[in-house]
Amino acid sequence: MLKCASVYTYELDDHEVAYHEIKEQIAQKIMLMENSVGIIMCHPEFIYSGALKYICEKLPFDTVGVTTSSQAINGEAGELILTLFVMTADDVTFKTGQTQSLEDEVEGPTRAAYEKVSAGMNELPKLALVFPPLILKYAGDVYPNTWGSILSNTPVFGTIAIDDTVSFDSSETIYNGENSKTCMPFVLCYGNIHPRFLVGTLPEDNVLAYQGEVTKAQGPFVAEINNMNAYKYFEERGFASNGAPTDSFLFVPFMIDLKKRADYDGVPVMRVLTTFTEDGTAIFRGNVDQNSIFTLSKCTEEDVVSTAIDKIKEINAMAEVHGVLSFSCIIRRMVQGADSLREAEGFKNQLEVPFMFGYAGGEICPTSVKNGSAANRFHNYSLVTLII
């Protein structure tokens, strides 16, 4: 049976103390079984200080993860913190690996890394945990789409690296203590593991009256809405001026109905508008399907917190929950303003099972798993949760 535990350290400078804190908490909370793996998240300062590498090199299992801006586990929430979510079992096998650089392409290096790590396994994994780098030239959909082409119907869950800087230049992925800006570490889970998923967006009451159809688009580039230049469309509604999105629009997500897709399961996805090109094409953080119908939705700090609390209550009511991984869009943190730990503290104070919570540069999670087939999606502005 799978067992999980969450541990942490705030210690940056004395590496032996940091490792001792992690080691002692693991010993107090869980007995390691035949197979173990650690999902690790930390503030980038743990990389610069050398603490991350020191800790990972001493742990008796592989560690895979990313940097983030703030985090929470049971009883703790903070910014300058390192957290570790340990999974251990006799009847679950964890196979870890990392791609070569994805700077030039994603699919080739990902497929090569998967084939190397999965060699000798006679079945597909029950779950893939993936931790892509933040490479801004890619729409985030490239990651779940690539893994979907490799793994067919396997659920894919994960978070894109992020940090707490304005430019996100310190975002790194982590594999066994080594950090990278271009490589993607991952965990393949085989055996007796049965993942469930939740996606939290915003209350239906928040949907605005602005609706339309994406009439010309390719990938994350939307040229026309309702047969009108995209910039003109947003400008007429007060969400763009002087060639850029207005400040108010940064926190108004674009909610897309994917019913034109053959695998649409009734769950909309959310997109964030990042900028406009000189010709008025809107650029989104993820792909936007041509002919999809969309609405706009407003968001406040209370909306972020309330959607998190709703999901926490839902998880607490579930049976046979061994552990939880939950990742929230970095913009949800920004919406919270000065009190930016409220969502994290909601998890810290109310979630009753072992968990790890952190912020994401993009969220990867199935919107459903039906008849053995996972509808793996890339999300913006969402709270995604894995329940195991």
Image (cartoon, helix red, strand yellow):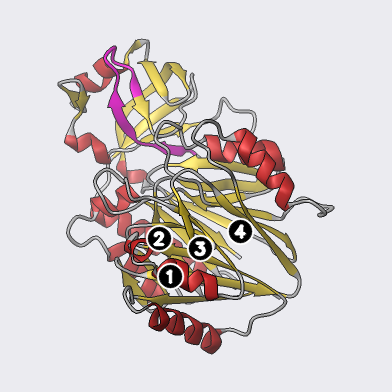
Quarter in which the N terminus is drawn:
bottom right
Vertical arrangement, residue 111 with respect to residue 357, above or below: above
Residue 368 at x, y percent in the picture: 60, 47
Q: Viewer-nearest of labels 3 and 1?
A: 1
Give the secondary structure at mark 3. strand
Residue 31 at x, y percent in the picture: 62, 85
Residue 88 versus residue 328: which sits nearer the camera? 88
- The residue tagged 3 is 325
- The residue tagged 1 is 83
Magenta residues (range): 268-282
Q: Which mark is residue 323?
A: none
**Among numbered discs 2 and 4, the one appearing first in the sequence:** 4
- Residues at marks 2 and 1 touching, judged by CB atoms closer than 8 Å: yes
Q: Dot 4: within a 10 Å radius of its alpha carbon, few (fewer than 14), some, or many (20 or more) residues?
A: some
- Residues at marks 3 and 1 touching, judged by CB atoms closer than 8 Å: no
Three-letter amino acid code at the position of disc 4? Arg
**Among numbered discs 4 and 3, the one appearing first in the sequence:** 4
Residue 151 versus residue 195: which sits nearer the camera? 151
Q: Viewer-nearest of labels 4 and 3?
A: 3
Residue 74 at x, y percent in the picture: 42, 76
- The residue tagged 2 is 358
